Amino acid sequence: MIQRNEIRELGETGEECILAQGKTKEFEKTQRMEKPGKNTSQDKRQDAAHDLDFYGEEIELLDFVSLKAREIIEQDCKITSACAARPYPLVMDSAKGSIIRDVDGREYLDLVAGVAVMNAGYSNPEVKTSISAQLEKVIHCGYGDFFAEPPVKLAKKLEELSGYSKVFYCNSGTEAVEAAIKLAFWKTKRQGLISFYNGFHGRTLGSLSLTCSKARQKEHFPAIRTAHSHYAYCYRCPYKFEYPSCGIECAKELENLIFRRELSPKDTAAVFVEPVQGEGGYIVPPPEFHREVRRICTDNEVLLVADEVQTGCFRTGPFLAMENFGVRAEISCLAKALGGGLPMGAILADRELMDWPPGVHSNTFGGNLLASVASLASLEFLEKKNTKTRVKEIGSYIRQCLGELQENFPCIGDVRGLGLMIGVEITKPNKSIDPAKRDKILKEAFKERILLLPCGDSVIRFSPPLVITDEEIDLGLEKFQKALKKASI
Ligand SMILES: Cc1ncc(COP(=O)(O)O)c(C=O)c1O
């Protein structure tokens, strides 16, 4: 059971959320308040009301949603594990395009696309039609053992979009990263890995070894041998250098420090890198960073794996974000938006690299037929809509507008991004992080009915559906400005 002092600690660092606190209290409360024989619906309702008063002491935003929403949250807190963090009490009912409707019928503008998943928009008609058609035929085929056409058609589309000649399917980001780790180990017969500080690659044990975002995510869990190196976080340069005179010292650390002192290239199977760091703070490195990492991998005969779980599927403009940097990794990992809203992950590599024989790796649901048709429809839709250009254009527009807000809101320390992956770093006047202020802004934004999420120590992320309209963008920015004003009072 989580202890109270731990809860306080979480709040202070801004890492965990108000609901996690509510859940913990709920757990304590169920232990304390179990009363046998109280079963009528009126009793239950009274209990719920009492419980909600109890939450209300800690969770101010629960006042903002209806009793119905609070009851669902209450039941959720009772029955599901408290280990996931939710930043505000949104209880979703339906959605279309970039608009989400909650169980109270209130509409919200989703500026995070269900955490970078709904690139083609909610209820996309083309995705829905293909899912319905497949639903009539068959949902599941056990693609690890049998054959079917939808995953093959999707693989051809992925080859066309990425240039990689082989695909392996799985169901999530962490599974894609696990598959990439195993392929790298299998291919090189080495068992060491390198990744970057602030990086996030998932939460299963292999991917978690690479993740280096928040110590809490790794507490008490064992790891695969992994060395971590500095990423090009220019706003807070680990070397206190200035770009471009720095000479991308952070990338050179792989050769100058890691390979010399910690992990020999002869023991290193692969370097894992996010083209733009996501969970770690929407950090966009200068182009030379990835080119230098690529050169070092090539010179030292180490594989480069691009974790495109968040950046892929046109999120930054091109299909793969590494294209922005002119870099090609040996393996690319995809998930999130790949399934058009259904669980789907994949790794891509060339035929010569992904030449592991039958039986080495597989799973039950990878290549699921509904997910495959949804994925294909979503990718074809985005391709047809000329998403690459549109994402670049609206991404620059949003960054420019957010940059203009800096004048009136000095708490905006930095605005950065690539395509529709945009981060606003909230700081104190001395440029130090201000997670409390960041969380206040997020809550005010929720009250304004725009959905945003935290990342990094003190960053607000914008990753809207790629189909967001011009009007919705302007509305979202107007509401964000209101939230900044209210949080500044
Ligand atoms: C870059 C990156 N890799 C891996 C993952 C893990 O994906 P999943 O949550 O689907 O396991 C995430 C999730 O946020 C991610 O952003």
Image (spheres, rainbow, N blue to C red):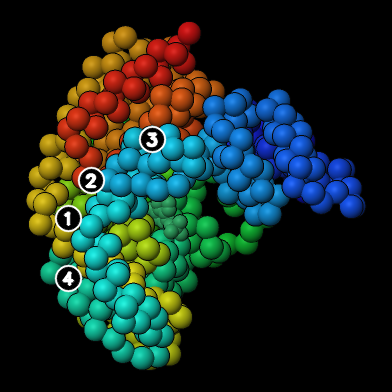
Q: Position of residue 30 (x, y in %)?
A: 81, 46
> Callout 3 environment at 10 Å: few (<14), some (14 to 19), or many (20+)?
some
Residue type, mark 4 in image: Lys
Number of dots carrying numbers: 4
**Callout 3 amino acid:** Glu
The percent position of residue 125, horizontal first and vertical second, equals: 23, 57
The structure residue drawn at horizontal position 16% and vertical position 58%, both measured from the top left corner, is 381
Residue 107: mark: 3
Q: CA distance from mark 2 to mark 1?
A: 8 Å
Tag 2: Cα neighbours inside 10 Å, few (<14), some, or many (≥20)? many
Badge 4 marks a residue whose secondary structure is: helix
Is any part of residue 433 visible from this angle? Answer: no
Q: Earlier in the sequence, mark 3 or mark 2?
A: 3
Amino acid type assigned to the residue bearing label 1 in the image: Leu
The answer to which image quadrant residue 159 occupies is: bottom left
Q: Which mark is residue 157?
A: 4
**In this rendering, the label closer to the viewer, 1 or 4:** 1
Give yes or no for contact between labels 2 and 1 (Cβ–Cβ under 8 Å).
Answer: yes
- Residues under labels 3 and 1: Cα distance? 25 Å
Could you tell which of marks 2 and 1 lies nearer the N-terminus? Answer: 1
